[in-house]
Image (cartoon, rainbow, N blue to C red):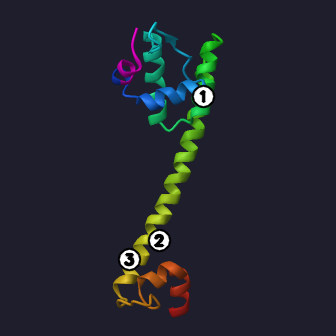
Amino acid sequence: MFTIGDLSTKTGVSTEAIRYYERIGLIPEPQRADNGYRVYAEADVERLHFIRRARTLDIALDEIEEILAFRERNEPPCSHVMRVMERRIEEIEHRIRDLQRMRDEIQHLHEAGKQLPEDVQMKSCVCHLIQTGIREEVTNNG
């Protein structure tokens, strides 16, 4: 049996997160020692390891809850987990495309900004390009 501090140390999950996971039902309500302290079992360590690893993969708490619910119902969660991972891959690929577009825009702004003067009024400097957008500025000047 472990105290919440021991559980936190063993899993790398903060005591605040452990309490939160209890409140939302991701981990079961712990037993209480005679002194009222929470006490946890090895199963809680394993469950928290799973939750922590799933969170590092950016799996949402409600998705983790559903995965754990399969296990609680004594059903294999594998097919569900595969669908969750497929959705995550699609979301990540979309985010990568968005980040690449943002990088390209920032690169264009940076290059254009090198040619512009400093301007406290921000009317003819790189700040103006950020405000109006480089495409508009290039269209007006090109």
Q: Which mark sits nearer the N-terminus, 1 or 3?
A: 1
| Residue 58, horizontal then vertical, whole percent | 50, 38
Q: Which image quadrant for residue 113?
A: bottom left
Where disc 1 sits, the SS reads helix
Query: Disc 1 versus disc 2: distance between alpha carbons?
Result: 41 Å
Describe residue 128's horizontal placement relative to residue 71 as left or right: left
Query: Disc 1 versus disc 3: distance between alpha carbons?
Result: 45 Å
Magenta segment, which residues?
1-8
Q: Visible in this render: residue 53?
A: no
**The disc label shown at residue 110, or none:** 3
The residue under the point 60% across, 15% down is 71
Dominant secondary structure (helix, strand or loop) of the stretch shown in magenta: helix
**The disc label shown at residue 45, or none:** none
Where disc 3 sits, the SS reads helix
Q: Nearer the viewer, mark 1 or mark 2?
A: 1
Q: Which amino acid does the dot numbered 3 rest on?
A: His
| Residue 90, horizontal then vertical, whole percent | 57, 44
Above or below, comparing residue 130 to residue 95 in the picture: below
Q: Visible in this render: residue 127?
A: yes
| Residue 125, horizontal then vertical, whole percent | 41, 87
- Was residue 7 drawn as part of the magenta stretch in this picture? yes
Viewer-proximal residue among 40 and 51: 40
Which residue in the protein does label 1 denote?
24
Which residue in the protein does label 2 denote?
105
The residue under the point 56% across, 40% down is 88
On the rendered image, what quadrant is the N terminus found in? top left
The residue under the point 54% across, 82% down is 132
Q: Which mark sits nearer the N-terminus, 1 or 2?
A: 1
- Was residue 101 drawn as part of the magenta stretch in this picture? no
Q: Which mark sits nearer the N-terminus, 2 or 3?
A: 2
Q: Which image quadrant for residue 124?
A: bottom left
